[in-house]
Image: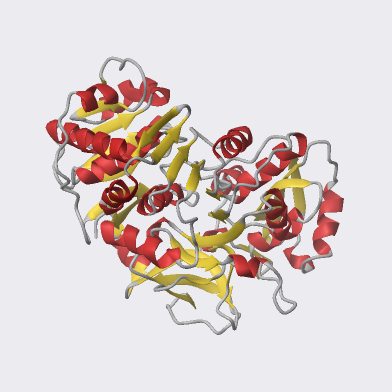
Amino acid sequence: MHLTQGLHRAVQTRGRETATIFGDRRRTWSELRDRVARLAAALVARGLKPGDRVGVISLNSDRFVEAYFATWWAGGVIMPSNTRWAVPEHNYALADSGTTILLLDRNFAKLLPELAAANEFRAVILLDDGEAPPGTESVDAIIASSQPMPDTCGNGNELAGLFYTGGTTGRSKGVMLSHDSLISNFLCASGMLPYSSEPIFLHSPPMFHLADAAAVIGVTMRAGQHVVIPFFSPENVVKAIERHRCTDAVFVPTMFAMLRDYLAAHPADLTSMRHIRYGASPISETLLRDAMAMFPNAEFAQAYGQTELSPAATALEWRFHKERNGKSYLRSAGRAIFGIDVRIVDEEMRECPTGTVGEIAVRSPGNMLGYWNQPELTERTIVDGWVRTGDAGYMDEEGFVYLVDRVKDMIVSGGENVYSAEVENALASHPAVAECAVIGVPDDKWGERVHAIVRLKADARASETELIDHCKRAIAGYKCPRSVELRAEPLPLSGAGKILKTDLRAPYWVGHSRRVN
């Protein structure tokens, strides 16, 4: 299998139909393939060899889609960078990956002097409109001046992408994904995470993140339409859905919260949406119910996974978003996707009894090849073919997985294990809470104290005591926050929309040594 197969099929079956929409620009599948073949030829002409890495630093655009497929067409390896990184973080990934050609849009062209000073690029290409600034070449100019080349895409177990993790628990790592792993995950997930037959897919999460990169692959496989907005904002999303009558999308929970707040003041017609996937971080039942009300015609499906799995491992199908036999499954991350093995293990990789919290381990054809340049970490993470996810959870008697925390985020307070996701779920059910994060902070008596950081909804009020008392009515007392910090500003997010608990914890642990599981 190879990743350009979907592009060839889309041209074969729907060549004259729209492939990409970005602002007022539309391109057909035939036009897209032609641009991809020409850009691939330009990359090769600038020294790209099979297996060489192509870096991309760009907001979302139709040209980002072209960059993915052109890199694979030329036999290269894509290395998309997190757009929220600082220059040292970009330089780390570029140097660590050995990136030889860099594509970047105008928003990041100002970084080029510092990037070029620390790296040796064979070429730097402006992935944007207009005249290229000094030191770069215009992507449209090189496409126009190049002849299309035959597809030399790699295949099978060959490296296709280096996706650097978001760094929510430490320094970013380069996850190596092959053609087989990316395609097989799409095929395994398709039965439980369906698309519309010819989806009009809205790309609003960052395209450097695997959740959206997987959608680039999946929508192309289905010859749908890629509707691309530069970045997520509630206004951008709502306008794109109404204008293009989008049918499919993927969101993270923080996006639902922002959409809820926006729609309260700006009602909109979102009835065209038919399939919504969500994941990347835990979601409260309250927020999920609000999201389903925002998109009344959409079937929701949750996907749990991580970059190391290409990315999905479990799915909570639409049929389980409704109460069945008096039981709600909304707090579950679903069951193992077809063709994927999931189990809960202890520190010795022994399977835990049903209902017991342990580490989620996954064995699948989508497993990563390993971490780039980190063989020891790879050996600790992939054990007998199983990827240790670092996520704590349990499985019930029906095979449903419940995510309770990152192993490194678990709080040990007075000898008791407290899982932040459970506390956050209790807090989020308070009507005044817009978003929250629960962390462990140093405490002389308890070792770690459960501490909540909360942002309230606009014009809402709630005191620290009220929020703690609210939690006491939902969960055991030892799990409840012992302190609450109210913030007016949004909580810090990674480029993938996850709350950065590492950043939230850091000020509290200066001069202290925190346990790491």
How far across and down, in percent of the image, does residue 66 sit? Answer: 32, 37
Quarter residue 120 falls in: top left
Q: Is residue 42 visible?
A: yes
In the image, residue 475 sits, relative to residue 280, either above or below, namely below
**Image-based side of 121 in relation to 471, left or right:** left
How far across and down, in percent of the image, does residue 106 sit? Answer: 39, 22
How far across and down, in percent of the image, does residue 492 sit? Answer: 59, 40
In the image, residue 499 sits, relative to residue 180, either above or below, namely above
Which residue is painted at 42% across and 33% down in the image? 61
Query: For the N terminus, which image quadrant?
Result: bottom left
Closer to the camera in the image, 476 or 56 = 56
**Image-based side of 225 in relation to 354, left or right:** left
Closer to the camera in the image, 104 or 470 = 104
Closer to the camera in the image, 358 or 256 = 256
How far across and down, in percent of the image, does residue 406 sit? Answer: 54, 61
Coloring basis for residues: secondary structure
**Image-based side of 271 in relation to 204, left or right:** right
Quarter residue 98 falls in: top left
